[in-house]
Image (cartoon, rainbow, N blue to C red):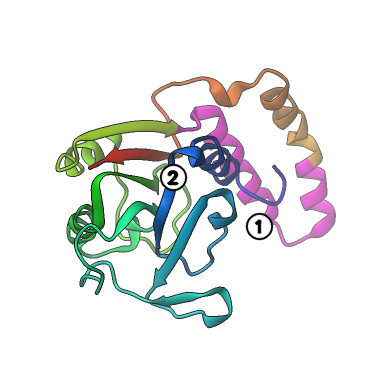
């Protein structure tokens, strides 16, 4: 909760919670750093526009289309990728093509989150509509207003250049984090969310 955003921690928890649904052959789209693959009992193929031979990541551009056959994968994960793409609809269509009938995909995007050179943000309504080619779409909101506030506060505090002042502000707001943890505030659902975690079936 100090070094990672609350958004990232909650996303990792959601992936771990639902990882049992992923099996067989799995494609990891945008896997420059395949940090989640250890959670899955699957045969993983990782692609990204940047090759990383050390981590087994091969070249693949999901917008332009991949070289795999139709229905090549039992499962696909696309974690925090769509928001960077110029043609996200082409990527969604390609994910649908590559999934076997009955296959399952995990897709996540940020929403109320810092600017990180992404192109757009998806509301729950918009992304659900864009995924309507799938037979079933389940949407889970990540976080809430309290979580968003903590991540903003932490980002601003760690941006303070003077270390003594940074530590003073961090200690000042640390009780807020304690209350979030003590009362499991991250489980509350409201009109704010830091991102979306989508589970779709073909």
Quadrant of the drawing holding the N terminus: top right
Q: Is residue 145 magenta?
A: yes
**Residue 173, percent from left and from top:** 73, 35
**120 lies left or right of 144:** left
Crowdedness of circle 1 by 10 Å Cα count: few (<14), some, many (20+)?
few
Q: Is residue 188 above or below residue 99?
A: above
How many labels were placed on the picture? 2
Q: Is residue 80 visible?
A: no
Return the disc, 1 or 2, that comes first in the chain's sequence.
2
Q: Which residue is mark 1?
A: 159
Q: Quadrant of residue 136?
A: top left
Q: Which residue is mark 2?
A: 22
The residue under the point 47% across, 60% down is 43
What residue span does the magenta drawing correspond to?
A: 142-170
Residues marked 1 and 2 touching at CB (< 8 Å): no
Per the rendering, the mark at residue 91 is none
């Amino acid at each position: 909760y100090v070094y990672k955003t609350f958004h990232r921690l909650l996303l990792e928890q959601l992936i771990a919670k639902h990882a049992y649904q992923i099996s067989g052959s799995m494609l990891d789209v945008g896997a420059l750093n395949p940090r989640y693959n250890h959670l899955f009992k699957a045969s993983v193929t990782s692609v990204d526009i940047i090759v990383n031979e050390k981590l087994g990541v091969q070249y693949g551009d999901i917008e332009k289309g991949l070289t795999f056959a139709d229905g090549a994968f039992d499962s696909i994960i696309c974690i925090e990728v769509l928001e960077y793409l110029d043609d996200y609809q082409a990527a969604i269509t390609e994910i649908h093509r590559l999934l076997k009938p009955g296959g399952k995909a995990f897709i996540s995007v940020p929403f109320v989150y810092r600017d990180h050179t992404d192109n757009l943000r998806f509301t729950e309504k918009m992304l659900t509509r864009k995924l309507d080619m799938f037979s079933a779409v389940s949407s889970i909101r990540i976080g809430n207003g309290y979580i968003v506030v903590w991540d903003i506060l932490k980002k601003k505090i760690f941006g303070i250049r003077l270390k003594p002042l940074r530590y003073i502000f961090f200690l000042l707001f640390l009780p807020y984090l304690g209350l979030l943890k003590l009362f499991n505030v991250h489980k509350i659902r409201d009109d704010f969310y830091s991102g979306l975690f989508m589970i779709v079936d073909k």
